[in-house]
Image (tube, rainbow, N blue to C red):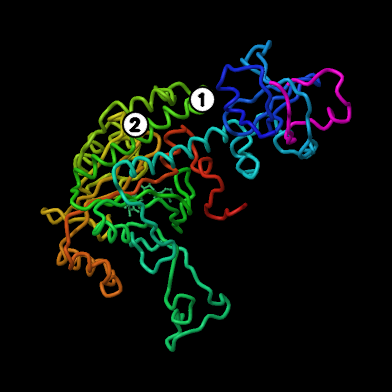
């Protein structure tokens, strides 16, 4: 018999039909009631076994074991479920040694512990919900751009250029570590390397996306990006996924509108399609909040927070205004910021969080950053000091989007690259777009995991990517 997914059975009121279900045993009570889960949804189906079944078989139905059940869907007499499966036969697919099974040994395992057993954590309700939400968000990303006529461009993972100019890249090489070929001056001879030059894992697909936008008008990338920054925080990964739309003819205002629409769309999509998962995650968060002191608890529950973001426009301010707000805050006057505030600083996450969580209490888009703290490609404003950059700051997260209008003027761009020591000869292909039919254009990058964090209400980015890569950690 063909397998029926548990989600389909639970969703319907239909009864008195034969099914086959397969999955993993979550619990087994009274030698009679199995809670079976196949990951298609949060809920388990209750499988009822006739009393007096074979002892040897019953012993093997343990938490974590995988089984196949043929039976009949009937109306449930018990509380908590509308329907259940009355088993005709149960086959063990794979035994589970409960003496060793980590999820059986720990009652209420902590998130930290579950990170150590990331190969098994998908089988918990929390991680089931998170990764179903993550999937929905990924699907919604493609749907959003596809519905608007964008072309999905696969930009390279291995690259010779440092798009952000921050120099935090992982080298890709087949040269022997212990004895690489050297030039006469002692430097490594990358002409001998696999690609005949020094290559790295990409930090961003933006530069290549810009090339695509100069032909398709609207493109986006959605792929893994890599940063070798030694940031051991709850918001940073060394390998994370980023969505980068790039749009010809858009200015910074169009760019902000697109980013805002995009974020709202993603949230609304999950609220419509992952109700059960979100309700579970909201409850989890509410329980966690109860452990905190009163003054640190968030005012809104997860679902209310998401509804609020969908229904309210983001605040838009300039960097200069942001600095003024910080300087005038009681928080600043009482010296509660760890990092000092003055015009020209790169906003620290404590500053960003003050703006969104304490001052505006909603997402904020900050524009017009000082050019010295931003990448070379951002369009220089007429004041000679700032660039048409935009960061979106989200409550509980800080920066979730970074983007800008790009400098489409060859002379200005070349001048800035020279100032920042970015090799214009190697980047001829990027500059060619400014030589051959240049147009105003803009784009941004949404950190996918930060978006998943925001939607799920989780606190640590390691819990929203299946197998996190962080400094000193690449298990699994
Ligand atoms: O602000 P970033 O560095 O912008 C860029 O890479 C541009 N090329 C984007 C563009 O304009 N096309 O990164 C964009 C976003 C950040 O706002 C943040 O959400 C996320 O990527 N991000 C990280 N997420 C997790 N771990 C890290 N180490 C991250 N670094 C950036
Ligand atoms: Mg940024």
- Report the residue at 62% width, 28% height from top: 6
Crowd rating for badge 1 (residues with CA inside 10 Å; few <14, some 14–19, many 20+)? some
Callout 2: CB less than 8 Å from ligand 1: no
Residue at which label 2 appears: 357
- Report the residue at 57% width, 16% height from top: 13
Is residue 203 highlighted in magenta?
Answer: no
**Compared with residue 308, is residue 201 higher up or lower down, i.e. above or below?**
below
Is residue 69 highlighted in magenta?
Answer: yes
Q: Secondary structure at mark 2?
A: helix
Residue 65 locus on image (x, y percent): 75, 35
Answer yes or no: is residue 136 visible. yes
As drawn, is 62 to the left or to the right of 446? Answer: right
Q: Which residues are magenta?
A: 48-72
Q: Which mark is residue 345?
A: none
Real-space CA distance between mark 2 and mark 1, rounded to the nearest whole angstrom? 27 Å
Residue 395 locus on image (x, y percent): 36, 33
- In the rendered image, the residue lying farthest to the left is 382
């Amino acid at each position: 018999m063909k397998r029926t997914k548990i989600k389909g059975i639970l969703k319907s009121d239909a009864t008195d039909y034969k099914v086959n279900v397969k999955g993993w045993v979550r619990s087994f009570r009274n030698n009679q009631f199995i809670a079976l889960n196949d990951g298609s949804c949060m809920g388990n189906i209750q499988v009822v076994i006739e009393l007096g079944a074979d002892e040897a078989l019953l012993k093997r139905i343990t938490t974590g074991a995988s089984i196949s059940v043929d039976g009949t869907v009937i109306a449930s007499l018990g509380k908590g479920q509308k329907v259940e499966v009355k088993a005709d036969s149960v086959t063990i697919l794979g035994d589970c040694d409960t003496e060793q099974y980590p999820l059986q040994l720990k009652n209420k395992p902590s998130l930290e512990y579950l990170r150590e057993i990331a190969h098994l954590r998908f089988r918990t309700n929390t991680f089931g919900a998170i990764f179903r939400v993550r999937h929905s968000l990924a699907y919604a990303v493609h749907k959003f751009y596809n519905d608007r006529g964008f072309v999905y461009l696969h930009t390279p993972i291995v690259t010779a250029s440092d798009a952000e100019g921050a120099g935090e890249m992982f080298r890709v090489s087949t040269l022997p570590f212990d004895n690489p070929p050297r030039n006469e001056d002692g430097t490594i001879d990358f002409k001998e390397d696999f690609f005949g030059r020094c290559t790295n894992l990409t930090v961003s697909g933006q530069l290549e996306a810009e090339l695509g936008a100069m032909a398709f008008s609207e493109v986006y990338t959605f792929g893994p990006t890599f940063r070798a920054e030694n940031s051991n925080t709850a918001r940073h990964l060394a390998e994370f996924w980023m969505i980068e739309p790039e749009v010809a003819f858009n200015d910074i205002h169009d760019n902000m509108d697109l980013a805002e629409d995009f974020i709202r769309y993603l949230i609304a999509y999950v609220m419509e399609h992952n109700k059960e998962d979100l309700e579970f995650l909201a409850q989890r968060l509410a329980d966690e909040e109860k452990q905190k002191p009163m003054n640190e608890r968030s005012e809104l529950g997860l679902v209310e927070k998401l509804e609020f973001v969908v229904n309210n426009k983001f605040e838009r301010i300039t960097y200069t205004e942001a600095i003024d707000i910080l300087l005038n805050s009681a928080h600043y006057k009482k010296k509660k910021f760890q990092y000092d505030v003055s015009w020209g600083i790169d906003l620290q996450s404590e500053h960003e969080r003050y703006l969104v969580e304490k001052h505006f209490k909603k997402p904020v888009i900050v524009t017009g950053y000082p050019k010295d703290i931003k990448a070379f490609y951002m369009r220089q404003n007429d004041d000679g000091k700032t660039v048409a950059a935009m960061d979106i700051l989200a409550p509980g997260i800080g920066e979730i989007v970074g983007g800008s209008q790009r400098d489409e003027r060859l002379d200005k761009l070349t001048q800035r690259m020279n100032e920042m020591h970015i090799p214009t000869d190697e980047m001829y292909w990027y500059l060619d777009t400014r030589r051959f039919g240049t147009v105003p254009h803009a784009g941004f990058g949404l950190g996918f995991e930060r978006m998943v964090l925001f939607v799920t209400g989780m606190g640590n980015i390691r819990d929203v990517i299946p197998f996190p890569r962080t400094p000193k950690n690449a298990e699994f």
